Image (tube, helix red, strand yellow):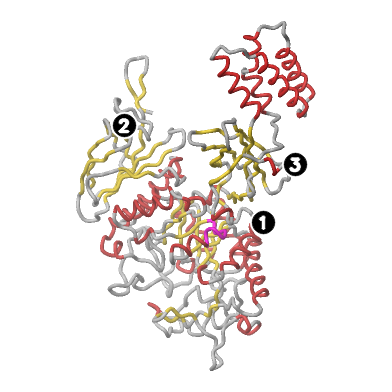
Amino acid sequence: MLDEGSRRVVIDRVRPEVDRGRFPTKRTVGDRVTVEADIFADGHDALSAALLYRHEGSEKWSQVPMQALPNDLWRGYFYVSELGRYRYTIIAWVDRFKSWQQDLAKRVEADQDISVDLLIGAQLLEEAAARTASRRDAQRILEWCRTLRSAEVPQEPRAELALSEKVSSLVEKYPETRFATLYPKELLIVVDREKARFSAWYEMFPRSCASRTGAHGTFSDCEKRLPYIADMGFDVLYLPPVHPVGHTHRKGRNNVPVGQPDDPGSPWAIGSSEGGHKAVEPALGTLEDFRRLLAKASEYGIEVALDMAFQCSPDHPYVETHPEWFRWRPDGTVQYAENPPKKYQDILPLDFNTDKWQELWEEMRSIVLFWIDQGVRIFRVDNPHTKPFDFWEWLIAGIKESHPEVIFLAEAFTRPKIMYRLAKLGFTQSYTYFAWRNTKWELADYFTELTQTEVKEYFRPSLWPNTPDILTEYLQLGGRTALMTRLILAATLGASYGIYGPAFELCENTPREQGSEEYLNSEKYEIKNWDIDRPDSLKEIISRVNRIRRENVALQSDWSLHFHPVDNDRLICYSKQTQDLSNLVIVVVNLDPHYIQSGWVELHLDDLGLDDSEPYQVHDLLSDGRYIWNGPRNYVELNPHVVPAHIFRVRHRVHTERNFDYYS
């Protein structure tokens, strides 16, 4: 037990620590967790510190030493090897034996008499022997103790023994921590599987997968589309809601308020006489068909993500069985969703402020558990910012306690602090503002915030150039080239990204009206028949980009992202690298979808592990071109109508005994 009355050591500014420990940080299995802190004490005594950690499933703490760095900064690290939650904290103490060794070394160097000092050291060794858990270690320490006290042994070899590494390392195993300072918080880490960090998503409406024009697609039709998705290199297939679609106030094509009898309605208007959130739209098939789709997708290395939208159509069974879960207006009707001037008469929001909130929360959790039982492990959550924060923290923590492999993606295009709060509360990944960041300054500023500040500890960005709701002006005006540009940016700036297809690869970019980000003839309100074999499809470059991501580990995480100067604001350059520098990728993108742009890229060679005096090869993984670069400044030129970017794999120069060079 620690003696708090005699503590001298201060442990301050521990990081990572999110909001003073209120929220956990995020990692994936196999990650190294580096922990830093300011640790200091009064006086000049030497200190020692250790990092304590354990998986929440274990009561036993593991301990690793922390290293002292300049200016009272200390650092230690450990690896997380299991899914779930880990706890970590720090303990630090005045190290009497290390302090004695430091003073002894100074006295030896000054050629002073050290006879008394050796006796003091022997006493400290004796105390260490009493703390040992190993009889063998205790015997070794006591043997050294006798040597230090022996007048028959000259002082010089006794001093060498006292200052030796073998003595230091063994005594360190049994420190005196009675007066140690224990950091008062046990900080948390949520450890997810790799797909939480690195994934490529493809969004697709299953009802638009039929081969016959005008027919309603089925889960069986989706199965036939799987080879196409796999060939493009996607590992997550995201489906909008697959539940029965309501009939009351069903929207027509292009979101007109009154639909025609054959209009399929919006999949987000969930619920009809056929069932609610635990049922599937009969036109798509059955639950058994859905489970078969999941199994078939798995054979292609694809996981199916399901949209989770906690809202209802006026026909949802909840309206009749649980009217208390809705907000009723004075005229006896239920309040539908509105975002003035927009009206969503086909959607009824659930009232999370109801007096029966506990029953509502439990039912929402049962929906997630139902689909987990069907085999779903990834959920894209619709508009989470319109539900209470406490609800999400409760729901996600409870689900991940029994199913730590589950991934939740937050679709929340809202104010930054709200987006960050949702991530802190437990959402595994989060949509971002990427779609609207177009200039070099905007991109560099935003992604520096996401990857180089505390935000990276809890917010995992998922980058989407387009969605069924988002057709940006850049895509509308830039056409095919703009789509390629945004694809490459999304896939290389972020380790996780997605596209809404086949609209993306088939270059759909016509808005419903000027100034709108809605697609003309939006798939949200009608069945589309896509010609996925069109010769102008972007599927080839998409396949190539996803293959590059799989083959280059540097692109599979976000934290090494670094921007490099270019003397042309229409060109952006950035790099990613592995910690050991074995994989280094440099990306240069022409942000102008209309004109050729050129400029001089300036690299920080030391940070990239490159020698300023040696040439190095950059291999363009998009075009397969190879170039020899010299020094930090090199010229680039990009024609957006060919390929608007370079994705360079840097290959270091290697000298061989046969007197020729090659690049690895």
Residue 643 appears in the rendering:
no
Q: The C terminus lies in which quarter of the figure?
A: top left
Q: For the residues marked 1 and 3, what is the alpha-carbon distance in whole angstroms?
A: 31 Å
Location of residue 404 with respect to 660 vertically, above or below? below
Whether 449 is among the magenta residues is: no
Q: Which residue is mark 2?
A: 617
Dots 1 and 3: beta carbons under 8 Å? no
Element at label 1: helix
Q: Position of residue 399 (x, y in %)?
A: 64, 60
The earlier-in-sequence mark between 1 and 3 is: 3
Q: Which residue is located at x 56 percent, y 38 percent?
A: 40
Q: Residue visible at 56% across and 56% down? A: 407
- Residue highlighted by disc 3: 1
Kind of element beneath mark 3: loop
Q: Earlier in the sequence, mark 2 or mark 1?
A: 1
Q: Which residues are magenta?
A: 422-428
Please tell me which residue lies in front, 113 or 234. Answer: 113
Q: On the image, which quarter does residue 99 sit in? A: top right
Classify 377 as above or below 186: below
Mark 3 crowdedness (10 Å alpha carbons): few <14, some 14-19, many ≥20: few
Question: What is the C-alpha distance between the residues marked 3 and 2?
Answer: 59 Å
Image coordinates for residue 314, horizontal then vertical, percent: 55, 83
- Identify the residue under disc 1: 401
Q: Amino acid at mark 2?
A: Gln
Type of amino acid at the residue the image marks with label 3 = Met
